[in-house]
Image (spheres, helix red, strand yellow):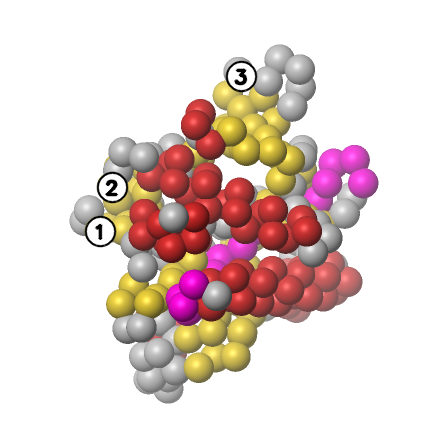
Amino acid sequence: METLYKGKTKDVLRHKDGSIHLFFKDDMTGKDGVFDPGENQVGLTVDGSGRSGLAVSRYFFERLNEKQIPTHYVHADVENNLMQVKPVTVFGKGIEVICRYKAVGSFMRRFGAYAEEGQDLNGYVEVTLKDDERQDPFISREALELLGILTQEEYDTIQRLTKDISDTVKDELAQKRLELYDIKLEFGKDKESGDILLIDELSAGNMRVYKGEDPVTPFDLEKYLLG
């Protein structure tokens, strides 16, 4: 396959038949060898983590497709770390949408003078720009429109989809006695239809999950969901 883009944890590939695939690597985000889904740099490499992340992503994407929530997911080849996806365009240079149920991570780093660790946030939604150099800055709804990244209608659609997707993931985890603290999503537009779709992955690499007061590791998340 032809490599179209090399990312931190995934590469984008194009098959000779024109189909687009994501290759899930064994690189994980974190710092100083410790996994952290909130970091924007590769912190460690763990054999099998790519396959595990794809298996969990397939599980959630199939649940979303059953509920007719629009995603870019087509098919997963877990043994080869490949996920076939629909071709999409991104908003600007990419945006990330975070749905927060508990106050942890970057929320506490920014608002720790007002919030308490683990405080309920009731599915608060915020948007950041994908920009490693500027540490993925938060951006308001108004600024997104002013800079030509999102229209107000697109923002409303993404906010609604974020709540639907996040609540679905939260409910699935709750069935396994797990609690979703926050989740980071990405969206794009279907190149053919122009519809807004959930893109990227849905794994421990972009969510914080707890069992009681203990964080759930990526491999343990797969075991809880699929074991």
Three-letter code, disc 2: Leu
Which residue appears at 32% of the width and 52% of the height?
220
Residue 181, how many percent across, how many down? 42, 69
Going by the picture, which residue comes out furthest to the top?
16
User: Which residue is the site of mark 1?
Assistant: 34
Going by the picture, which residue comes out furthest to the bottom?
114
Span of residues in magenta:
176-193
Q: Are marks 2 and 1 in contact (CB under 8 Å)?
A: yes
194 vs 80: above or below? below
Three-letter code, disc 3: Glu
In the rendered view, does 214 fall on the left or right side of 191? left
Front residue of 172/192: it is: 172
Which residue appears at 29% of the width and 63% of the height?
215
Which secondary structure, mark 3? strand
Going by the picture, which residue comes out furthest to the left?
32
CA neighbours of label 3 inside 10 A, class few (<14), some (14 to 19), many (20+): few
Separation of marks 1 and 3 at Cα, in angstroms:
32 Å
**Does residue 114 appear in this view?**
yes
Three-letter code, disc 1: Val
98 vs 190: above or below? below
In the rendered view, does 41 fall on the left or right side of 165? left
CA neighbours of label 2 inside 10 A, class few (<14), some (14 to 19), many (20+): some
Magenta stretch secondary structure, dominant:
strand
Write down the quadrant of residue 102 in the picture: bottom left
**Does residue 132 appear in this view?**
no
User: Which residue is the site of mark 2?
Assistant: 44
Lower position in the chain sequence, tag 2 or tag 3: 3
User: Which residue is the site of mark 3?
Assistant: 2
